[in-house]
Image (cartoon, rainbow, N blue to C red):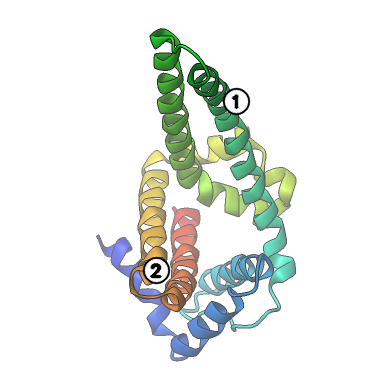
Amino acid sequence: MDRITEAFNWPFRDPDWVSKLLIIALTLLIPIVGSINGLGWMLASLDRLRAGEDRLAPANLSYIGRGLRLFAVELIYVLAIAVIALVIFVPALALSVNQGQGSANSGLLATAVLLNLVGFSVITVLSLALTFLTPAIVLATDRAGVAAGIDVRAVVLRSRANLNQTLIAGLMLIAASFVGSLGAVACGVGVLVTSAYALAMQAWIIRSFEKG
């Protein structure tokens, strides 16, 4: 419970947390580049935690290079999940369209429905797996680049080395993701501020995993 509280509280220890989160929120308005810079800023904040400083990294657009590798790795994983899902959804769609053009076969329709359910289940399971592997992916990418980040075997081995830490970090990342989406409930701009705050939370979560 203390670890969860720390993840939520640590950004507020920086006297300049308001201005930093607002600036990062504004940079997130920039398509793609803003997200890349945000990841780099998260890694820079992680460096601050490694140095024993309870301060967020300065908020600016200087982290694009730092975040590019991690953005590329995350994109590769997302595309891989999308391809796997398409392998399941395309036959389901083809069956549905084919049966909609003539006399429907109940067996084929049931197969199409089953494939859709399997597809959604696969996406859910793989997305959760990616969340729980994220700390190991981030650390590997930050240390040794894209090749290390997409080395699934090494990433899984590091995550399995301490399943308790992996489980806790994964659940906390889910909480951070939820916090990041809260702004959408209030207003469109609010989601950018909460997304910046979620990035700061991620830095603490990954540092906690690294120490563990």
Q: Residues within 10 Å of mark 1 (few under 14, many from 20)?
A: few
- Type of the residue with mark 1: Val
Residue at x 40%, y 64% (from the top left corner): 181
Q: Residue extending furthest left? A: 1
Q: In the rendered image of this protein, does residue 3 appear above or below residue 141?
A: below
How packed mark 2 is, by other alpha carbons closer than 10 Å (few <14, some 14-19, many 20 or more), is: some
The residue positioned 54% from the left and 40% from the top of the image is: 158
Give the x, y percent position of residue 210: 50, 55
Residue 58 image offset from top left, x and y in percent: 59, 84
Q: Tell me the amino acid under the disc marked 2.
A: Ala
Expressed as whole percent of the image width and height from the top left, the position of residue 67 reads 67, 64
Q: Earlier in the sequence, mark 2 or mark 1?
A: 1
Q: Quadrant of the N terminus?
A: bottom left
Q: CA distance from mark 2 to mark 1?
A: 32 Å
Q: Residue at x 70, y 52 (%)?
A: 72
SS class, disc 1: helix
Residue 132, percent across and down? 45, 44
Relative depth, front residue between 15 and 34: 34
141 with respect to 170 (left or right): right
Q: Which residue is mark 2?
A: 184
- On screen, residue 108 versus residue 1, left or right, reads right
Q: Is residue 207 above or below residue 100?
A: below
Q: Residue furthest front?
A: 102
Mark 1 lies on residue:
87
Instruction: Write down the quadrant of residue 148 in the picture.
Output: top right
